[in-house]
Image: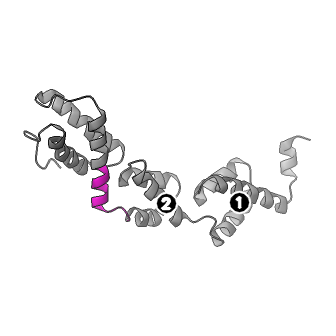
């Protein structure tokens, strides 16, 4: 008998035990959202009513908690990956965290925290990159565009990005002369 035929003959109790085992294995590796686990169970052929029941029970006993997951994810991605609120919000959306939980978790990052983290990233990049000839307007503009682009790719807004870069320039040998004071 093939493995697929065996799976079709499982009783609901066997399906439930299998689904619990899979979820516990995945949760032992890292935290997951309810939606992530639902998708994984679906890919393993677990019937929807069984997976819904297992996930409901896991939520009741707090083995899965999307709000707690969102809090931890925001903290980790902002602090260690240097992501801005926009990028983290997109990641949470892709992971199936509802908007209310995501917004609450993102609220733990203040505007000052986001600005400080962006500044750290710019300072780190300026220290690590090749020296820039700040007297050459084209080279200066290219360096600014690269720094602003780096922050944009990490989910920082254009205003924060541009302002942080122009604040950092004088500390790294450049000047903000000739740049717009408030571009956004």
Residue found 87% across the figure and 45% down from its top: 5
Look at the image and tell me in which quarter the N terminus lies: top right
* Neighbours of disc 1 within 10 Å: few (<14), some (14-19), many (20+): many
Tag 1 and tag 2, C-beta contact below 8 Å: no
Q: Is residue 34 above or below residue 143?
A: below
Nearer to us of marks 1 and 2 is 2
Residue 136, quarter of the rendered image: top left
Earlier-in-chain disc, 1 versus 2: 1
Q: On the picture, is 126 further left or further right than 84? A: left
Q: Residue 163: x, y in percent?
A: 19, 49
Q: Which residue is mark 2?
A: 72
Q: Secondary structure at mark 1?
A: helix
Residue farthest to the right, as pictured: 1
Q: Residue 70: x, y in percent?
A: 49, 61
Residue found 66% across the figure and 50% down from its top: 40
Q: Residue 32: x, y in percent?
A: 59, 56
Asked whether 154 falls inside the magenta stretch, the response is no
* Neighbours of disc 2 within 10 Å: few (<14), some (14-19), many (20+): few
Residue 51 image label: 1
Q: Is residue 74 above or below residue 151?
A: below
Magenta span dominant secondary structure: helix
Residue farthest to the left, as pictured: 178
Asked whether 115 falls inside the magenta stretch, the response is yes
Q: On the picture, is 124 further left or further right than 163? A: right
Residue stretch rendered in magenta on the structure: 108-118
């Amino acid at each position: 008998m093939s493995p697929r035929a065996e799976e079709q003959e499982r009783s609901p109790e066997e399906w439930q035990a299998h689904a619990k085992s899979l979820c516990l294995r995945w949760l032992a590796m890292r935290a997951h959202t309810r939606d992530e686990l639902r998708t994984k169970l679906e890919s393993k052929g677990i019937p929807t009513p069984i997976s819904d029941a297992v996930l409901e029970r896991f939520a009741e006993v707090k083995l899965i908690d999307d709000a707690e997951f969102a809090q931890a994810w925001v903290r980790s991605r902002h602090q260690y990956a240097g992501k801005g609120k926009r990028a983290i919000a997109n990641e949470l959306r892709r992971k199936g965290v509802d908007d209310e939980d995501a917004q609450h978790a993102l609220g733990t990052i203040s505007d000052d925290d986001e600005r400080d983290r962006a500044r750290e990233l710019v300072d780190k990049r300026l220290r690590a990159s090749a020296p820039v000839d700040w007297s050459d307007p084209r080279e200066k503009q290219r360096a600014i565009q690269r720094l602003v682009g780096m922050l944009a790719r990490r989910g920082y807004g254009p205003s924060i990005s541009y302002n942080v870069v122009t604040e950092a320039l004088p500390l790294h040998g450049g000047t903000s002369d000739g740049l717009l004071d408030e571009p956004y």
